Amino acid sequence: MTAIAVQPTGWRARLMGGGRTARIAYLYLVPAFLVMGVITIYPLLFQVWMSFTDYGIQNLRAGSAPPNWVGLDNYVNVLTSQLAIPNFHFVRLILYNIWWAISNVVIHVVLGVAIAVLLHTPGLRFKRFYRALFILPVIIPPIIVATVWKNMYDPQDGAINQLLAGTIGVLFRMPPEMFRIDWLRQVEDPIPFIPLPLAYYAMLITNTWLGWPLNSVVATGALQAIPQELYESAEMDGASGWQKFRYITIAYLRPAMIPYAIYGFVITFNLFHLAYFMSAGGPFGRTELLVTQAYRLVNEQRLYGVGASFAVIMFFILLAITLVTNRIAKATRSYTEV
Amino acid sequence: MATIGLTRPLPRVALRRAGRGRLSLPKQAFLQALCILILLTVLFPILWVFSLSLDPLNRSRPEGLSIIPSNATLEAYEQVIRQPTNNPISFLGLAANSLKIAVGSSVVSVAIGVSAAYAFSRLRFRFREALMLTILGVLMLPPVATLTPLFVMLNQVQVDLPVLGQFNLRNSLLGVGLAIISGLLPFAIWNLKGYLDTIPRDLEEAAWVDGATTNQTFVRIILPLAMPAIAVTGFLGFVGGWTEFYFSWMFLNKPDDQTLAMALYSMQGQFTNTPWSAFSAFAILFAIPPAVVYFFAQRWITSGLAIGAVKG
């Protein structure tokens, strides 16, 4: 008790602020900001400077001449697709990347919710068993998922072609030679009027396999939080099954699923592993994403200055996405609160 | 509810609620068939890799789909444990490198991160919002964003050491660890702060009333209460480091420094003649440690994530 009397400020004051607290607070922050300052924030600023230079492999050695200042050249070259590398088309890259993220997330959410609802059916047996096993794709590291699925899509010996030959092929008496589909490298688009290569559909399948289970977990959590009384009173009021689903289930799932869908969108937008390990951006760079293109610019092409400007442009694209998604999240939140 | 039941026969809903196992047989069978179909799609790739890994080594490619192939053998496992790639390094050597990166980066990030998270969650100071926004801004960036400058900067740290010879920070496990921390630390701060925000303040207030200092409160009260989040953040950081690819692939040149992820990628490249059985055995050995922990600590992991706290 005497301790309080000795203290110049009471505990409540310490909680709310004051000179001493602030000093202590900074002490707690110093290690983190020292480390982040040196290996995160300074590099990001350094990158902005690099983006205005022709930094290349000749400038790497310690003590070599500094790179030349080139002004906005790198930015102009990236934005107008005039880089000296094959298959680079900036507008196509962004449009594909956005479409890749949207199409994946829509499928993930719909499948995730549908399967969660299926497993939520009262009286269904072995629910716990299914729920435990359906989570398996999530727990395998993505680099392994991507490399294994690449082998599965192998035109000669891949599991997918063998599976097709063993089912459809046997059923319709088609020879196994019919199933030599080159899933990840076929140049012709499978659907003539949709300008997307077969590799996109192949990776969409892989990412669906990978993506729906977590959505299902989130949806299950939300489903279990719906009060049963709602369904009972709706039933007494004569609501049909569809009406109950539409006005109770969906209404309750929405606030849980929308933030998760946004999170999934950002994750999928930056999903490096599939595009890099499976299709390697092919055919002709048409399944390249911003992240894999950025990696290729510095790791393969060694264009450090261009890579830096590309990263700065990416920062603004991601910033725009964050602002838009935040707005969507806010808009939907007020909708559900009304 | 009860009065309705007393005055007239129970409505259908109440019946169904009471007898939870009631689902007509055809309906049950149909839903079971649907679940099994989904289960097969989930298990198919896993079973395929498993069966490939048991394939005899002298066949470079599998001949058909079967869970246990004819002449099943563990030779592939033996080979990848001894020497998975052309580089003279064993599985344990690769795993040791991945382990160093994973443990180092996750321990450092969590240790530094929890103290910053405490300040953000509990203390009041100037520029609090601005600093938190900085962290959120960095968090938004994918790891590829810092790749170029870190490569160039770390490459400038080259010293001649008396015994070890030329040391290039970029071309070292330490450099890769630093690069990973640069992305992991903001995540650790954000995730731990999210968890600390959910811890009620009553205990701390009681401690403060009893005259505990800020440091004592942090060490004796906050740290023990935050253990689930600390463990989960550390585990996620560990898995990230264990499977890290971008930085290691670009930074490391010495065969001795190869990691598991680098070996997996080079085993799959078009210019190697690694049998698929060896590749599959390697993939399984690589996936097992994080997968086993995830599988058994699933509920715990989702509860220790800030996103879990947000979704309620």
Image: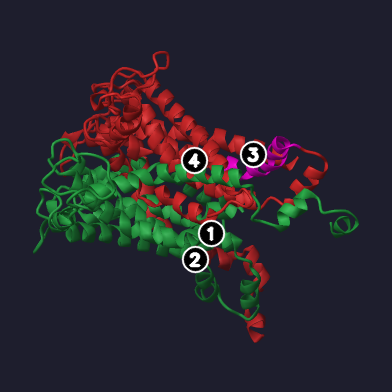
Question: Label 2's element?
Answer: helix
Horizontal side of residue A49 vs B197, given as left or right: left
- On residue A264, the disc is 4
- Chain B pictured colour: green
Residue A65 sits above or below residue A76 on the image: below
Q: Chain for mark 4?
A: A
Residue type marked 4:
Gly
Do marks 2 and 4 share a subunit? Answer: no
**Compared with residue A94, is residue B82 higher up or lower down, i.e. above or below?**
below
| Disc 1: CA contacts within 10 A as few (<14), some (14-19) or many (>=20) | some
What is the chain identity of the residue bearing mark 1?
A: B
Span shown in magenta: A240-259
Please give the residue where the numbered disc 3 appears in the rendered image: A330
Q: Residues within 10 Å of mark 4 (few under 14, many from 20)?
A: many
Instruction: Have a look at marks 4 and 3 and say if they share a chain.
Output: yes
Distance (Cα) linking label 3 and label 1: 24 Å
- In the picture, one chain is red; tell me its letter: A
B157 or B79, nearer to the observer: B79
Given the image, what chain letter belongs to the residue carrying mark 3?
Answer: A
The residue to which callout 1 is attached is B303
Q: Residue at x 40, y 32 (%)?
A: A204
The quadrant of the rendering that contains the N terminus of chain A is bottom right
Q: Compute the Cα span from label 2 to label 4.
A: 24 Å
- Residue contact at pointers 2 and 4, CB within 8 angstroms: no
Picture residue at 26% right of the left edge, 23% below the top: A178
Location of residue B146 in the rendering, given as x and y in whole percent from the top left corner = 34, 43
Q: Residue at left 31%, top 27%?
A: A169
